[in-house]
Image: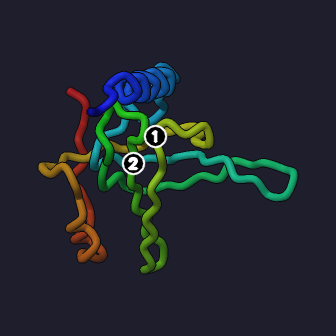
């Protein structure tokens, strides 16, 4: 016979930990797929810590919007080389997120940008009404 009290207890502890994480300030909540953002990420170099900016297009959001393991994928192209990084939304290492430009997109994931180069990889800008 299964003991349901231990599974309920562990589920309650997990829900409590997730609610504690979600109560923190989510800096990436204002971003959407297609936005051009600058994200500051804290990097430890020896004993010192500095903030390194990563600038690019948000091509995907993962793990749900209101979940403790939510992620954001940013793609940057520089001199013909593309770099994609996945950042956890609720990480204490994310220092700031600035939305520089909003784009008009009709997809939830912009993975098709991986095959496009140059002017074809541009997105239409969305202006405030």
Q: Residues within 10 Å of mark 2 (few under 14, many from 20)?
A: many
Residue drawn at 37 percent across, 22 percent down:
5
Q: CB of mark 1 within 8 Å of CB of mark 2?
A: yes
- Asked which quadrant contains residue 91, the reply is top right
Residue 14, image x, y percentages: 43, 29
Gap in angstroms between the C-alphas marked 1 and 2: 6 Å
- What residue did someone put label 1 on? 89
Label whose residue precedes the other's in the sequence (1 or 2) = 2
Residue 35, image x, y percentages: 33, 46
Q: Is residue 109 left or right of residue 62?
A: left
Picture disc at residue 72: 2
Residue 27 visible somewhere in the drawing: yes
Q: Quadrant of the N terminus?
A: top left
Pick out the residue farthest to the bottom.
80
Q: Of residues 127 and 5, which is closer to you in this image?
A: 5
In the depicted structure, whether residue 28 falls above or below residue 48: above
Residue 18, image x, y percentages: 44, 28
């Amino acid at each position: 016979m299964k003991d349901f009290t231990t599974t309920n207890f562990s589920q309650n502890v997990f829900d409590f930990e997730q609610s504690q994480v979600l109560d923190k300030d989510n800096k990436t909540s204002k971003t959407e797929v297609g936005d051009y953002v600058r994200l500051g990420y804290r990097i430890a170099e020896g004993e010192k810590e500095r903030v390194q900016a990563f600038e690019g297009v948000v091509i995907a959001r993962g793990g749900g919007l209101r979940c403790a393991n939510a992620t954001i994928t940013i793609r940057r192209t520089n001199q013909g080389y593309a770099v994609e990084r996945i950042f956890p939304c609720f990480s204490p290492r994310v220092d700031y997120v600035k939305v520089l430009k909003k784009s008009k997109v009709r997809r939830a994931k912009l993975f098709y940008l991986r095959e496009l180069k140059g002017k074809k990889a541009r997105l239409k800008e969305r202006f405030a009404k």
